Amino acid sequence: MKLILSRKGFDSGNGGQPSPILTDGTLLSLPIPSCDLDNAYSTIMWNGMSYYDIIRSLNPRSKINNESHCHLDPDLRQDVRNRMTGWKPAFGQMSSALTLLRNNNISIGDIFLFFGWFKATEIIGGRLVYKKHAPDLHVIYGYLQVGKIIEKKCDIPDWLKTHPHVSYDDSWRKGKNAIFLPSDYLSFQNDMKGSGVLNFRSDRVLTKSGNSRGCWDLPSFFKKVSITYHPNPWQNGYFKSANKGQEFVMEATPEILNWAKQIII
């Protein structure tokens, strides 16, 4: 079994601000900007508020406007938009990042843990704002255990046809596109769905306290495995995560798998 730490959502180059840790502990990952016409920030909703309004409340100077569209992927939250009958969570990958996954033989049963850049928020004067002096953190906010991999466009079911990766016809023709669907239930916790979102919890924070968000406080048993993009990551008492790269793949040793289980459950 493989474990993949998958970096997703707003970053310094795409979106330019942290995703919010909402006051109830919700980790609301903000999808990066794109030209995907099916998903405008103004039409994706959370608790009666559009993602566009959330972004502008947190950062009035954001370049995101009322017409901006986003790459809603991984698509894990059912209730953010209207769905067709049969909808399931899904995660697409393509080009060099997909090649990396294929080269590492990612297959049925492997587990993605999605993480991103987050910051705590509060309500002041009825407005959602970032909490003053709150740290910038890398936090694990979702998971997907692979139950099926779609590698041909002709195999895409109707309920999945609004997923952003469906429209990338050239990538499908070249064999450089795929969509990962979850198992019905987790193999190690059969009362939990094979994909889901997580609320904020201290053990889901990767960032080492008092350090920049890319400096992680991983258990020492991670030193025993090779992790893609990380030839020599251990320094000064922490794991220095790569500045670039989306998919950090490693063997799910018994210790690492147990760590992942605790994160999810």
Image (spheres, grey):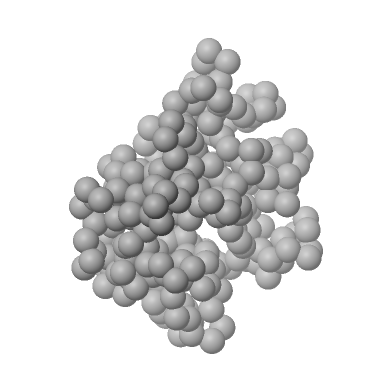
Answer with the quarter of the image where residue 92 lies: bottom left
User: In this image, 221 relative to 50: left or right?
Assistant: right
Position above or below: 158 against 52: below
Res 207 visible = yes
Left or right: where 236 falls relative to 54? right
Quarter occupied by residue 259: top right
Q: Nearer the viewer, residue 146 or 27?
A: 27
Q: Is residue 118 visible?
A: no
Q: Residue at x 56, y 45 (%)?
A: 140
Q: Against 6, is 203 above or below?
A: above
Between 170 and 55, the one lying in front of the other is: 55
Front in this rendered view, residue 252 or 214: 214
Percent x, y of residue 162: 39, 77
Horizontal relation, residue 81 to residue 32: left or right: right
> From what the image shows, is residue 107 above or below residue 7?
below
User: Looking at the image, which residue sits at the far front?
Assistant: 125
Q: Residue at x 38, y 32 (%)?
A: 243
| Nearer to the camera, 124 or 262 | 124
**Position in image of residue 49 (x %, y %):** 41, 67
Residue 199 position (above or below residue 226): below
Residue 84 x, y percent position in the rendering = 48, 85
Q: Position of residue 183 (x, y in %)?
A: 65, 66
Question: Which corner quadrant of the image does residue 38 belong to?
Answer: bottom left
In the displayed structure, does residue 237 sit left or right of residue 13?
right
Q: Residue at x 63, y 24 (%)?
A: 223
Residue at image location 31% in from the left, 69% down from the top: 42
